[in-house]
Image (cartoon, grey):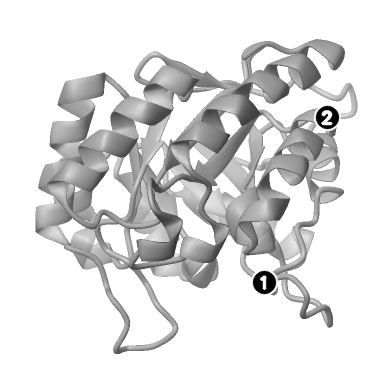
Amino acid sequence: MMIDKDTQGAATATVTVGDVVFGGQRLVLIAGPCTVEDRTQMIEIACAVKEAGAVMLRGGAFKPRSSPYAFQGLCEEGLEILAEARERTGLPVVTEVLESSQLPTVAAVADMLQIGSRNMHNSVLLRDAGASGKPVLLKRGMSATIQEYLYAAEYVLSAGGRHVVLCERGVRTFETATRFTLDLSAVPLLKEQTWLPVIADPSHGTGKASLVPPMARAAVACGADGVIMEVHPCPDCALCDGDQSITPELYYNLVKELRAVAQVVGRDI
């Protein structure tokens, strides 16, 4: 299945995860911590982001890190906690799978599989995720061109996957003031070139909590079908990516702002 739009510019297809619809009139807000740290933290955040307006819960059970000595996640225990958080809140769960051998374990809990930036070029994992039957959230590789990104999505689709959501999460440039450079021009460009829904990740895209709100607003303004953000009750104490995490209170206020922006561009939250 080729992902290119036809000459008529077909509308964005919808991808359904539980009651959540990507690519429709209503934007999808996904929020949660970078990684599952413990049960209390996860349940607290899940309840807080749902109250604020999030419709999906994120959280890493298996966590890829640049350093082999950094916290790698709670693994199977983290999945159990995510399942409990979903039961408590009703929010569908998206969490990352790192390798094909993990797919049965992760897919047994996750409502949506995340393929992270580091694995965007992992053709075996992409094919296996596509064959799993689960919806896939595919993040753009940190050094990937748009064409390479679309080919990665094609691997998932060619294996039988029909439910893929793209996520712009920032690319590496010469700039060092931010963790990555959030390429928001990729959002409308991808929507021109493919019928797949496209969301944005201003948390990883900037690496700075202070930049998350303005870039989230910009993502909605430029046509993103949703926004995924990292939320933590105490970012300074976070085991992973605290610098880019916002508090539940800030997230609550931000969702109000995103609703206003969405109305301007003819969308709902």
Q: Do the residues labelled 2 and 1 touch (CB within 8 Å)?
A: no
Is 151 left or right of 263, judged from the image as shown?
A: left
Dot 1 amino acid type: Arg
Residue 169 shows in this picture: no
Name the spot of residue 9 as percent of width and height, x first: 86, 25
Name the spot of residue 230 as percent of width and height, x first: 48, 48
**Is disc 2 placed on a helix, strand or loop?**
helix
User: Which of the 4 image quadrants contains residue 142?
Assistant: bottom right
Name the spot of residue 14 as percent of width and height, x first: 57, 21
Label 2 neighbourhood size at 10 Å, few (<14), some (14-19), many (20+)? some
Quarter occupied by the C terminus: top right
Disc with the residue nearer the chain's start (2 vs 1) = 1
- Residue topped by disc 2: 221
User: Residue 179 has which mark?
Assistant: 1
Q: Is residue 261 above or below residue 178?
A: above
Q: Nearer the viewer, residue 93 or 4?
A: 93
